[in-house]
């Protein structure tokens, strides 16, 4: 039986994955259900909501393919509205909390593998979330019957970084010590979550060579591995505002001082954006990183998720 998420799935993996990642930004459960049922999206109305939870910082849902029974976990990225509590948790508790790292505490990774404290905090939040009946994510998967072995763990931006963390955790929870691919991170525009040892584990154990999608003109996937690129973005287009240069220099200095060594898992799947020479830098950074732009670059229909 053909499944939507397969390591040999080609373009459809990116199209369906980014569509589910975009749906994860929807403001509530009812909108998610409606979008999953929409036959005009890349998901073609073939997915149904199986589990959903949200708290003040994170939102995540599990969808199931009606044909194959395959599951996919979709994690919301950072909220952009500063008038919401989630904005401050996402950006300052998880996204930007990168100046200190911690050892990966759940086993499986090479000895000494380290991850950002913000990413670890985000993982902890995901693991404590419970649905309306009081069941957490691990409990949900323990209760599933005849689960197809490969479950996609999907996210855009912050959701992408957290997808790598969650997939690694769930593998240790369900298949510790086994050389199998049971939870597959499929990420879009994700910043780094850990160091070279952690990234190498993601690459070898979790087959991220062909499931880390990034727009080559997107600033976010360059964080926190390639800050020098951000300093010189966008080639041939709008330049980084002068007032941001000291901030980039300071961040780079602290990261170097702490010997963090943030690293992306492998070369990934590059997507070629188009720079608007008439934009200012902030507008261009937002455009290149947006979920709608990623859908366009992947050849998937746009998703009206109702988020601000």
Image: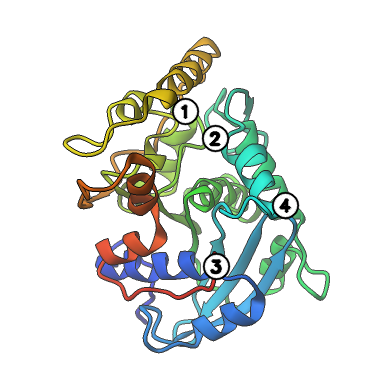
Q: Answer whether labels 2 and 1 touch (C-beta < 8 Å).
A: yes
Which element carries disc 3, helix, strand or loop? loop
Which element carries disc 1, helix, strand or loop? helix
Work out how far the residue at label 3 is from the one at label 4, CA to CA, in angstroms.
Answer: 15 Å
Let me know if residue 107 appears in the view: no
Which element carries disc 4, helix, strand or loop? helix
Which element carries disc 2, helix, strand or loop? loop
Label 1: how many Cα within 10 Å (few below 14, some 14–19, many 20+) = many
Left or right: where does residue 42 sit relative to residue 127?
left
Q: Write down the residue under mark 2.
A: 109
Work out how far the residue at label 3 is from the one at label 2, CA to CA, in angstroms.
Answer: 36 Å
The numbered mark at residue 307 is 3
Quarter location, residue 19: bottom left
Of label 3 and label 4, which has the lower sequence position?
4
Work out how far the residue at label 1 is from the one at label 3, CA to CA, in angstroms.
Answer: 36 Å
Q: Write down the residue under mark 1.
A: 197
Q: Nearer the viewer, residue 281 or 106?
A: 281
Q: Nearer the viewer, mark 2 or mark 1?
A: 1
């Amino acid at each position: 039986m053909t499944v939507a998420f397969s390591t040999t799935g080609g373009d459809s993996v990116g199209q369906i994955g980014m569509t589910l990642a975009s749906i994860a930004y929807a403001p509530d459960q009812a909108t998610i259900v409606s979008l999953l049922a929409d036959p005009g999206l890349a998901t073609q109305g073939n997915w149904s909501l199986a589990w959903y939870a949200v708290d003040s910082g994170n939102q995540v849902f599990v969808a199931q393919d009606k044909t194959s029974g395959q599951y996919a976990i979709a994690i919301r990225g950072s909220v952009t509205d500063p008038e919401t509590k989630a904005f401050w948790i996402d950006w300052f508790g998880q996204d930007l909390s990168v100046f200190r790292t911690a050892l990966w505490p759940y086993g499986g990774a090479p000895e000494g593998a380290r991850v950002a404290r913000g990413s670890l905090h985000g993982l902890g939040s995901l693991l404590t979330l419970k649905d309306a009946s009081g069941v957490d994510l691990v409990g949900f998967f323990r209760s599933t019957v005849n689960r197809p072995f490969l479950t996609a763990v999907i996210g855009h931006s912050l959701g992408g970084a957290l997808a790598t963390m969650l997939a690694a955790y769930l593998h240790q929870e369900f298949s510790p010590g086994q050389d199998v691919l049971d939870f597959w991170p499929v990420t879009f525009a994700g910043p780094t979550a850990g160091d070279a040892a952690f990234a190498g584990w993601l690459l070898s154990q979790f087959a991220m060579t062909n499931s880390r999608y990034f727009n080559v003109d997107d600033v976010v996937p360059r964080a926190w591995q390639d800050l020098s690129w951000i300093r010189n973005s966008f080639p041939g287009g709008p330049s980084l505002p002068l007032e941001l240069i000291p901030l980039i220099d300071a961040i780079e200095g602290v990261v170097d001082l702490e010997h963090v060594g943030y690293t992306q898992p492998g070369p990934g799947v590059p997507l070629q954006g188009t720079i608007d020479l008439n934009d200012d830098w902030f507008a261009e950074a937002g455009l290149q990183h947006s979920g709608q732009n990623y859908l366009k670059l992947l050849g998937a229909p746009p998703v009206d998720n109702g988020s601000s």
